[in-house]
Image (cartoon, helix red, strand yellow):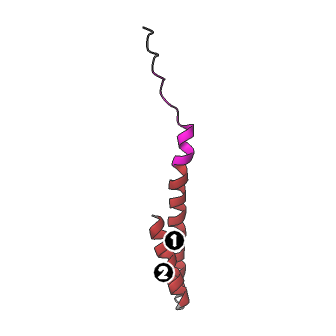
């Protein structure tokens, strides 16, 4: 998803360079939305992993 955000950012920069304002702003908006979706999907599992509740620990083995 990050690669798509980079592609749309490059399209926006090229369109802005050639003076296509509507295409540039649309591509920049799409790139921004994709970047934030990528950021949320990247950060959410890293925050949720330590918070996640683990199951009960296994019973200790009997002594011989």
Region in magenta: 45-58
Q: Position of residue 54 (x, y in %)?
A: 50, 31
Q: How many marks?
A: 2
The reply to whether dot 2 and dot 1 touch (C-beta < 8 Å) is yes
Looking at the rendered image, the quarter that the C terminus falls into is: top left
Say which residue appears at 53% left-offset and 36% top-offset.
Answer: 52
Queried whether the magenta region covers residue 62, the answer comes back as: no
Q: Which residue is mark 2?
A: 11
Numbered mark located on residue 31 in the image: 1
Looking at the rendered image, the quarter that the N terminus falls into is: bottom left
Say which residue appears at 54% left-offset and 76% top-offset.
Answer: 28
Q: Position of residue 18 (x, y in %)?
A: 52, 91
Given residues 2 and 15, the one toward you in this image is 2
How far apart are the two marked residues, 2 and 1, measured between alpha carbons? 9 Å
Q: Is residue 1 above or below residue 46?
A: below
Any part of residue 18 in sight: yes
Say which residue appears at 45% left-offset and 9% top-offset.
Answer: 63
Given residues 50 and 16, the one toward you in this image is 50
Say which residue appears at 45% left-offset and 69% top-offset.
Answer: 4
């Amino acid at each position: 998803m990050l690669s798509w955000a980079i592609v749309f950012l490059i399209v926006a920069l090229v369109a802005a360079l050639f003076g296509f304002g509507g295409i540039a702003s649309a591509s920049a908006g799409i790139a921004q939305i994709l970047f934030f979706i990528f950021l949320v999907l990247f950060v959410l599992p890293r925050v949720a992993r330590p918070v996640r509740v683990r199951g009960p620990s296994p019973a200790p083995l009997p002594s011989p």
